[in-house]
Image (cartoon, rainbow, N blue to C red):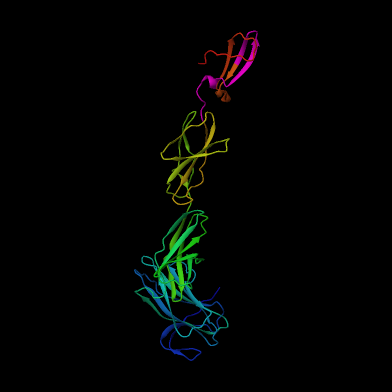
Amino acid sequence: MNRIATIVFLVQLLQTAEGQVFPGSFMMVNSSGRASGQKAHLLLPTLKENDTHCIDFHYYLSSRDRSSPGSLNVYVKVNGGPQGNPIWNVSGIVTEGWVKAELAISTFWPHFYQVIFESVSLKGHPGYIAVDEVRVLAHPCRKAPHFLRLQNVEVNVGQNATFQCIAGGKWSQHDKLWLQQWNGRDTALMVTRVVNHRRFSATVSVADTSQRSISKYRCVIRSDGGSGVSNYAELIVKEPPTPIAPPELLAVGATYLWIKPNANSIIGDGPIILKEVEYRTTTGNWAETHIVDSPNYKLWHLDPDVEYEIRVLLTRPGEGGTGPPGPPLTTRTKCAGATKTSICKLVHVISVKNTCFKLKLTSLEEEEGALVLPLVISCTVPQITGFSFTPYGID
């Protein structure tokens, strides 16, 4: 673990290796004799700004042997949250005197933020890291771009999420743009487009939308003059809804089923903008889907005495908003009414005596043991095959 070095506040003269003298008051860290990675922090008061503003400061890195004494990082912590990664830093150099940098921070009341300066020492590189003249100015920065408000993004699980960072200022090919997560993870921006000479935009896709969550991101740009940082916006990942219970069966006919979708209790997120019924036979490999626009729904044109499996699909706003089908309702349609065709489904010759024979007529309902009709019909036929008859009592 890195130890925190003590910041030395010098109200005196700083004399560099080149013999230059800088009068005044400033914050300075002496990196001589420090182990690599030791840190010193300077925390500014918490700021609650209502309008566009700019923070500027001067920094100085010096070393007797002209090697870098370490690095200087700047963090912006919002609403007392995590420190995250730096939005600005300088390392690997020594400066020729004091250098000015700007911070264009687009965080406004009721949100608040704190700027943290951090120096990190480098072993075997004695020298000084100093900060001076930190000011909050009531006007836009002259060199660091200012971001417009970053909007929240809502997507469904498994879909791509895209943030659009729009900034006011001049775009340079040397500028570095990235998206910074609340926990400090950085994601490089993919596409930058110049809108006009005073404005440019950049987009980035966030791939981690595999599960229901809420996370925060902000846009950061590093330019020659300093850094700009946007407000934090939320990435809200919603889970498409699915019913907890199967549909409720209200009525059954030979060619229809009345159901109630039962979509009030769900797993996942609303609002529900579309309800659909998906049904199929339990022995078939086809399925049909119908839109439901009423509390109860009637499935038409079904086959008699067939078992069906019925599920409900729910959809919320956005691409990929349809959830998986809910639990199934499995039910069977009734048999068709008694007709000559339906009753005489099967004709069995039971016995033949001279010119009379006995028939067993099996209806569609016999599969469930509902009806068996043994009849004795008197007739005269020369042979059993090729006869026709009209059984009595069937019309």
- Vertical relation: 255 (above or below) 210: above
Image: 89 above or below 252:
below
Foreground residue among 332 and 388: 388
Classify 319 as above or below 137.
Answer: above
Residue 79 visible here: no
Left or right, 310 with reference to 379? left
Horizontal and vertical percent position of residue 187: 51, 65
Q: Residue at x 36, y 76 (%)?
A: 137
- Tell me, yes or no, if residue 209 can be seen here: yes
Q: Nearer the viewer, residue 361 or 19?
A: 361
Q: Position of residue 378 (x, y in %)?
A: 59, 9
Find out whether residue 305 is within the magenta segment. no
Residue at (57% x, 36% y) in the render: 284
The quadrant holding residue 356 is top right
Quarter of the image with the N terminus is bottom right
Q: Residue furthest bottom?
A: 19
- Residue 335 shown in magenta: yes
Q: Nearer the viewer, residue 277 or 83?
A: 277
Relative to 205, residue 327 above or below: above
Count of numbered tags: 0
Report the magenta residues as a range. Answer: 333-359
The x, y position of residue 379, in whole percent, is 59, 9
Residue 243, horizontal then vertical, whole percent: 48, 44
